[in-house]
Amino acid sequence: MTEKRQVPIEKGLFTWPSDKPQLIGGRCKGCGVYFFPKFYIVHKPGCKDRQVEEVLLSRRGKLDTYTIQYYPPPPPFITPVPFVPYAVGWVALPEGICVAGIITGWKFEDIKTHTDMELVVEKFWDDPEENEVVSWKWRPVKGAK
């Protein structure tokens, strides 16, 4: 029996493997605006500069808002059968952007906005080669209220 490998959902989105993973974002050298993912360039109105530097985004932020996903998303997203609802949160990072991700480690009824959140990497699904496909998620910081 071979050991399952963990593979990122998409290369270049987060540092992996890592004990302290970080999202890989971009920053415009002209206007200083941060964005994620690094290849999704978002600028201030009027900025003509397209020079981008790769940056590692903060691992912690505050939960800005969230929603509960009660139905499976359409392909190409892969969902387990039977489908289990999950929470998606938008976390405000110190860099001035919000990054969406699945919320983990919390019951729906306990989720509160403005809670300190941290980035984790966890399994999403098993691929046809039986690898664990992993992606970033947000979880409340231990002891956060």
Image (cartoon, helix red, strand yellow):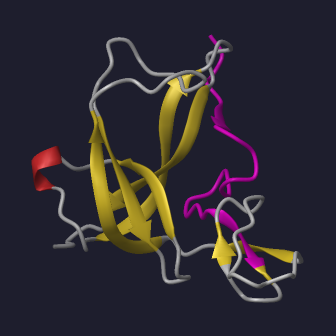
Q: Nearer the viewer, residue 38 or 104?
A: 38
**Residue at 78% across, 80% down:** 28
User: Measured along the vertical axis of the image, is residue 72 above or below residue 21?
Assistant: above
User: Measured along the vertical axis of the image, is residue 64 above or below residue 137?
Assistant: below
Residue at the outermost front position:
46
Residue 110 falls within the magenta-colored stretch: no
**Residue at 45% across, 51% down:** 101
How far across and down, in percent of the image, does residue 46 sit? 76, 85
**Residue at 38% across, 12% down:** 81
**Residue at 32% across, 12% down:** 82
Residue at the outermost bottom position:
31
Image quarter of residue 79: top left
**Taking 36 as reference, is 30 left or right?**
right
Q: Nearer the viewer, residue 17 or 65?
A: 65
Q: Nearer the viewer, residue 105 or 81?
A: 81
Image quarter of residue 114: bottom left
How far across and down, in percent of the image, does residue 16 sit? 67, 52
User: Measured along the vertical axis of the image, is residue 40 above or below residue 61?
Assistant: above
Give the position of the C terminus as an image quadrant: bottom left
Q: Nearer the viewer, residue 46 or 62?
A: 46
Residue 3 falls within the magenta-colored stretch: yes
User: Mainly helix, strand or loop, the magenta region?
Assistant: loop
**Taking 78 as reference, is 46 left or right?**
right
Magenta residues (range): 1-27
Give the position of the N terminus as an image quadrant: top right
